[in-house]
Amino acid sequence: MGRALNRTLRAVHALLTSVTALLGLTTFAGTAGAAHPPAGQATRYTMTAFTNSSESNMYVYDSPDATGFTLRKDPAYTPPSGLIRDPSIFKHSDGLYYLTYTTNWTGNTIGFARSTHRVNWTLFLYNHTIPVSGLTRTWAPEWFIDTDGSVNIIVSLTSASTATHFTGYKITATNSALTAWSTPAQPAGIGPNYIDTFVVKVGSTYHAFTKNETTKYIEYATASSLTEPAVAPGLADANCYSFRDSAGRYLRHWDHRIRFDSSSGTAVFDKDATYCARPGATAGSVSLESYNYPGRYLRHYNYALRMDLYQNTDTFRADSSFTGVSPWA
């Protein structure tokens, strides 16, 4: 089946037997039982794959219980050009099956195809360009259908010169034909250095399974909202904090001024975007000290945010004290 498919199976096994939580680092051990369909109902688990020796061909396997898979089509689809790595399929509300996939080792596109049958694929649709400046690699698109009916894709992006420091982004279809897509937004709580992010929603909670590029563990996180602005554990120190907007950019200092930037995946960026909470000037407030420039605090001055050295004045203490409030609607 090839190393690519074997890696997929090993990842599924790791997910079932040793899931590491992003918050709290909880590990679950044991073997999960097979998911059998209810009596009288036929269920087929479909798996799409590629191999290292055949990265331009997609193979389709299925199983009645998600434990033993049978090859159904070899190959099931070959795009007109490029690769078909990381293929992901779902059945749309129009009754047709849609495929998205990685088109190449480098670049800024993902591919789409359509089929009336989950096994036989003949219709190439188009390659979609992800509108993020400087992308060098666009990998592992995964379908996610939200409970509101919206069709989304979680895709791993990086602007690094090598295949490192991937970050997951969500794009949402803006028409039912799946030919137009929203601006990418980063899922809340999952920073850089994660790839192959897969999301499901149970009730009102989003569950994300994602691979840590450093440890190679599959990690697990939950959220009440997929892409809301987030206060997250500090990129450079989990005992401190980092702040991210809905587009996935981080609040960081540059030349002692504050701005939102996309993560570069470097240690310098992580430190610039990390702030440590200190007691504020009034009850319930906090001051935010720079992680890599101790003694400098986030403060507003002349209607702008900056990092300034601490001053023992009432004005500075007031300017550098912040109180959490409910976000604007």
Image: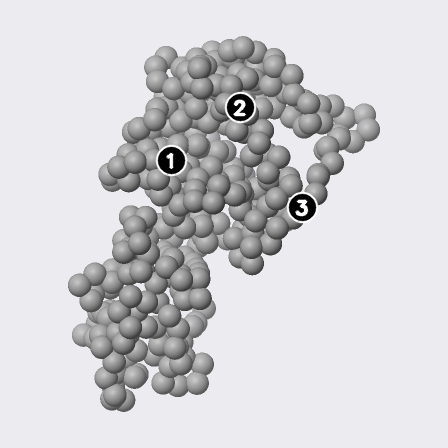
Which sits earlier in the primary sequence, circle 3 or circle 2? 2
Residue 117 at least partly seen:
no
Which sits earlier in the primary sequence, circle 2 or circle 1? 2
Tell me: residue 262, above or below residue 281: above
Identify the amino acid type marked 1. Answer: Trp
Residue identified by numbered label 1: 181
Residue 139: image quadrant is top left
Front in this rendered view, residue 160 or 142:
160
**Could you tell me which secondary element the residue under label 2 belongs to?**
helix
Residue identified by numbered label 2: 5
> Dot 2, how many residues are within 10 Å of its Cα: few (below 14), some (14-19), or many (20+)?
some
Q: Identify which residue is drawn at 61% across, 14% down.
A: 71
Spatial CA span between label 2 and label 1: 29 Å
In the rendered view, does 119 fall on the left or right side of 131? right
Spatial CA span between label 1 and label 3: 39 Å
**Could you tell me which secondary element the residue under label 3 belongs to?**
loop
Spatial CA span between label 3 and label 2: 23 Å
Q: Identify which residue is drawn at 30% across, 69% down.
A: 290
Rendering coords of residue 68 (x, y %)? 68, 23
Identify the amino acid type marked 3. Answer: Ala
Residue identified by numbered label 3: 29
In the rendered view, does 119 fall on the left or right side of 34? left
Q: Identify which residue is drawn at 25% across, 88% down.
A: 312
In the rendered view, does 216 fall on the left or right side of 287? right
Q: Which mark is residue 202?
A: none
Q: Identify which residue is drawn at 32% across, 48% down.
A: 265
Identify the amino acid type marked 2. Answer: Leu
> Dot 3, how many residues are within 10 Å of its Cα: few (below 14), some (14-19), or many (20+)?
few
Rendering coords of residue 275 (x, y %)? 35, 67
The C terminus lies in quadrant: bottom left
